[in-house]
Amino acid sequence: MAKLFWLEAVLPLGIIAGMLCVMGNAQYFIHRAAHGRPKHIGNDVWDVTMERRDKKLMDQYSGAAN
């Protein structure tokens, strides 16, 4: 029984790991509910600006083609 002293740390570590998973999943589901799609990893202000620019250019191109 003296060799199982590490077992005392398993329950707190499990609780901490579980809470980290819950927090991460909560952020995912809240963002998906608010925006309708999952958050892209590494999507910063520059990426958003380029996405808007690309969308504007595609709208202009499709408007000119008609």
Image: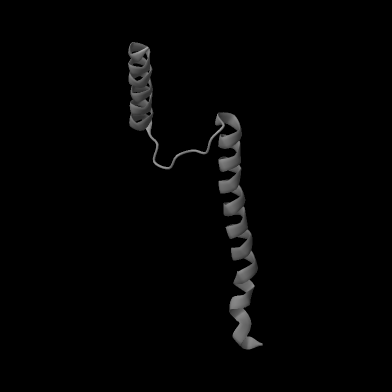
Quadrant where the N terminus lies? bottom right
- What residue do we see at 38% from left, 34% from top? 44
Q: Position of residue 24 (x, y in %)?
A: 56, 47
Question: Is 42 in front, or is 55?
Answer: 55
Total labels: the figure holds 0
Question: Is 6 in front, or is 27?
Answer: 27
Above or below: residue 28 compared with residue 35: below
Q: Position of residue 19 (x, y in %)?
A: 61, 53
Q: Quadrant of residue 49?
A: top left
Q: Position of residue 46 (x, y in %)?
A: 33, 30
Q: How is the image coloured?
A: one colour
Q: Is residue 64 left or right of residue 26?
A: left
- What residue do we see at 62% from left, 82% from top? 4
Q: Residue furthest front?
A: 66
Quadrant where the C terminus lies? top left
Above or below: residue 18 compared with residue 49: below
Q: Quadrant of residue 17?
A: bottom right
Above or below: residue 66 compared with residue 29: above
- What residue do we see at 43% from left, 42% from top? 41
Q: Position of residue 6 (x, y in %)?
A: 58, 77
